[in-house]
Image (spheres, helix red, strand yellow):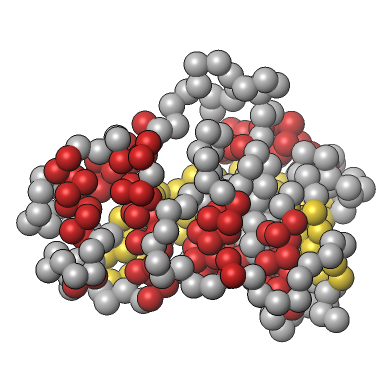
Amino acid sequence: MLAQMQVEVRDERSEAADPVHDGRPGHTGHGRHSGADGHSGHSGDATSPEEIRRSLLIHDRVFKRSHQEIASWLEVGREHRVLDAGCGVGGMTAVFTQLAASLEAIDLDEQNVAETWIRVNATAGTRDVRVATGDLTALAYEDATFDLVWCSRVIHHVPDTVAAVRELVRVTRPGGTIAIREGGFPFRVLPDDIGLGERWLEDRLSAAGVGRFGRPREPEAGSVPYPFGWSQLLADACLVDVETKTFGFDSLSPLSADEEAWVTHHWRRWLTREDWRALLGPEDIEVMEQLLDPDSPHHLFRRTDLHLRAGLTVDTGRKPASA
């Protein structure tokens, strides 16, 4: 056995692990504390766990190279013990498995843990790996256990973000690193003028998307407002040497099958979810229907000028050696 596991999982690969080529709606992330390497869902976003996993799996295939670049920047080596806190379906877990001396990966969702386990077993890396269900706000590890704690797109779900990061700091050894991935730039794929409808379609989609996640009228019970940036959050958790780096992703036409699936997966929900569709004007709806229709002469992937680009931002801080 390549690794140790603390929950029972199925032996066969689940249907959710199949490539996403049908463009069914979905939004990444899961629950209030569950991990994600894709763009996370939010409170009030009624996306099923199955659709979330589909999004995470396609995300990990598209951004595999970026994940490797992130691990290289973090200088993960054979002497390091790593915690992937909120591992989602294991995109970064698989990368860390090939680099670190030992690895622990946790997620609240048992099916996410099962998907991560499948990936770990398919990765020819270290044998000292454990995958388990767990809550990053109450970690079952002793103080000063890990050299690196990685947490992707999870902290913003937690009611008390400072307390959550301090819990990550607790299990990090003095001199070790906390790395959180929360920021970045949404993906874009089209030129500003596509000769169909009004210009800047993706700017309007972006504005509509941001509008869905306004400040709630009544804060969630137990939530602690934190109106500051991610780098400040790390500093407020008593970390030093805070750094931030954005990893760019670029791909030109013709896009790969996975890249096409990624765009279709995220755009299709604007047409299939009534609450999202209501945020768009009639002309933009008509344009998107043509762009996503394989039989239309305006089908998105008939174009030869596509530029799929995105930015993945990672913030890091070091636990003081005297801590």
Residue 135's image quarter?
A: top right
**Residue found 69% across the figure and 28% down from its top:** 160
| Position in image of residue 278 (x %, y %) | 30, 35
* Residue at the outermost top position: 218
Q: Nearer the viewer, residue 187 or 318?
A: 187
The answer to whether residue 253 is left or right of residue 184 is: left
| Position in image of residue 20 (x %, y %) | 46, 68
**Position of the N terminus by quadrant:** bottom right
**Residue found 20% across the figure and 37% down from its top:** 281
**Position of the C terminus by quadrant:** top right
Tell me if I can see residue 188 in this picture. yes
* Residue at the outermost right position: 142
Residue 163's image quarter?
A: top right
Determine whether 85 is above or below 218 in the image: below
The answer to whether residue 55 is left or right of residue 21 is: right
Residue 296's image quarter?
A: bottom left
